[in-house]
Image (spheres, helix red, strand yellow):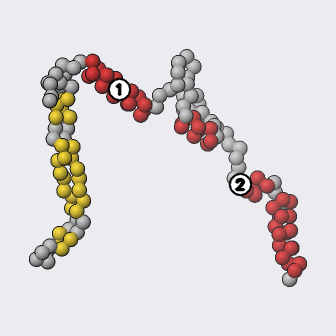
Amino acid sequence: MKHSKLLIPAVMALLLSACAPAKDVINPYNENFKCRATDDEGKCIDTPTAYREARYPQVAEGESGPAENEQQAIQNNRYRILAALLQEPKKPLLQPPKVLRVLLLPYRGEDDELFMTRYVYLKIEGAKWILTDLDEK
């Protein structure tokens, strides 16, 4: 019994190392593939490199500064619009009202009615004009 406990790991190690290279046992698939992509169809790179390039785009030659992602471009556009509005105080804006959504859980009424889950919307603050020349006191 004692010898069988030592024999099993020894046989497994022998099988894994002697019959084939270790990488063939771990990954039995052929990793040598021929890329058929042409220059206009893409490029042949491994998965980690493709992920890195997609996640963190490189700056193309001739460009200055880091490439902006789409969210940063949208935020920069919003800042430009707001800066233009602040420089033109004659253009008033209407701030929308603040609305609070309240969830009412199910409950039983006085005459044994059942009120199910629903939302109630409450206007907390009305709409107001901003960026005007009105003197508010």
Up-down relation of residue 76 to residue 103 (above or below) = above
Q: Is residue 7 left or right of residue 82?
A: right
- Where's the C terminus, which quadrant? top left
Query: What amino acid does circle 2 point to?
Result: Asn
* Residue beneath the point at 21% across and 25% down: 131
* Residue marked by disc 2: 27
* Residue beneath the point at 59% across and 37% down: 52
Q: Nearer the viewer, residue 72 or 4?
A: 72
Q: Is residue 136 left or right of residue 34?
A: left
Query: What amino acid does circle 1 point to?
Result: Tyr
* Residue beneath the point at 31% across and 22% down: 83
Q: Can residue 36 be seen in this view?
A: no
Q: Helix, strand or loop at disc 2? A: loop
Q: In this view, does 50 lie to the left or right of 108?
A: right
Q: Residue 21 is drawn in which quadrant?
A: bottom right
Structural crowding at the residue carrying mark 2, measured as other residues with C-alpha within 10 Å and reported as few (<14), some (14–19) or many (≥20) = few
* Residue marked by disc 1: 79
Q: Is residue 71 left or right of residue 57?
A: left
Up-down relation of residue 55 to residue 79 (above or below) = below
* Residue beneath the point at 27% across and 22% down: 86
Query: In the image, residue 49 lies at what x, y percent?
Result: 62, 38
Q: Residue 126 is drawn in which quadrant?
A: top left
Q: Nearer the viewer, residue 65 or 109?
A: 109
Mark 1, mark 2: which one is toward the viewer? 1
Query: In the image, residue 16 lies at what x, y percent?
Result: 81, 61
